[in-house]
Image (tube, helix red, strand yellow):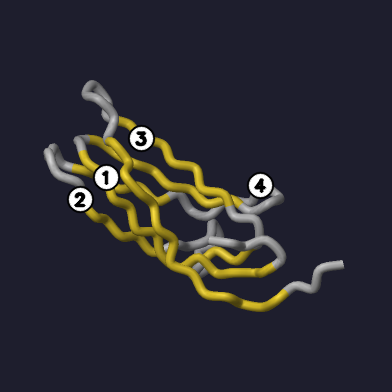
Amino acid sequence: PQSVHRVISIKEVVLIAQGSGTVTVTLYDIAGNASTAMAFTLASTSRPTQLRGLVSTTGGGQGFHATHIQARIDSDGSSNSAPIVHSLHLGYSDLTAVPVA
C-alpha cells in the first residue's frame, strides 16, 4: 500500500502460493523494526492456495503501525523446490495523516 507520509496499520496478510514447503513473511518499517514473522505451511498441490495470517508486533501487539513498509518473503521447500508465491496482499487501515514539510 501507499504508506509514504501516512501511518497505517497492517492487520492481515493474504498469501497466494503453491507447492510444498514454508513461506515466511516479515514486515519492516523504515527504521528496520520488524513485525513477528508469519510462517505459512503449504502441502503439495498443483494449484495456488490462499492462506491468511493476522499481523502482530514482536511485543505481542495487534497490527504493525508504520510508514514506508517493506515486506520480506522467504520461501523454503527443504529438499523440494521452494513454493511459488503468486501474490501477497496486505489488509490495512489508515491511522493518521502526517504533514509533508
Q: Amino acid at mark 3?
A: Ser
- Crowding near the residue tagged with mark 4, few <14, some 14–19, many ≥20 C-alpha atoms within 10 Å: few
- The residue mark sitting in front, 1 or 4, is 1
Q: Amino acid at mark 2?
A: Thr
Task: Name the residue rendered at 39%, 64% in the picture.
Answer: 54
Q: Which mark is residue 99?
A: none
Against 83, residue 69 (above or below) is below
Q: Which residue is mark 4?
A: 32
- The residue mark sitting in front, 1 or 3, is 1
Q: Give the Cα separation between the discs numbered 4 and 2.
A: 30 Å
Q: Position of residue 7 (x, y in %)?
A: 65, 69
Q: Position of residue 61 (x, y in %)?
A: 52, 68
Asked whether disc 2 touches disc 1, contact meaning CB atoms under 8 Å apart, the reply is yes
Q: Amino acid at mark 1?
A: Ala
- The residue mark sitting in front, 4 or 2, is 2
Q: Amino acid at mark 4?
A: Gly
Q: Position of residue 44 (x, y in %)?
A: 13, 37
What secondary structure is found at the residue carrying circle 1?
Answer: strand
Asked whether disc 4 touches disc 2, contact meaning CB atoms under 8 Å apart, the reply is no
Q: Residue furthest right?
A: 101
- The residue mark sitting in front, 3 or 2, is 2
Q: Give the Cα separation between the discs numbered 2 and 1.
A: 5 Å
Q: Which residue is mark 3?
A: 75
Q: Give the Cα separation between the discs numbered 1 and 4.
A: 26 Å
- Crowding near the residue tagged with mark 1, few <14, some 14–19, many ≥20 C-alpha atoms within 10 Å: many
Disc with the residue nearer the chain's start (1 vs 3):
1
Against 10, residue 21 (above or below) is above
Q: Residue furthest top?
A: 79
Q: Which residue is mark 1?
A: 17
Disc with the residue nearer the chain's start (2 vs 1):
1
What secondary structure is found at the residue carrying circle 2?
Answer: strand
- Crowding near the residue tagged with mark 2, few <14, some 14–19, many ≥20 C-alpha atoms within 10 Å: some
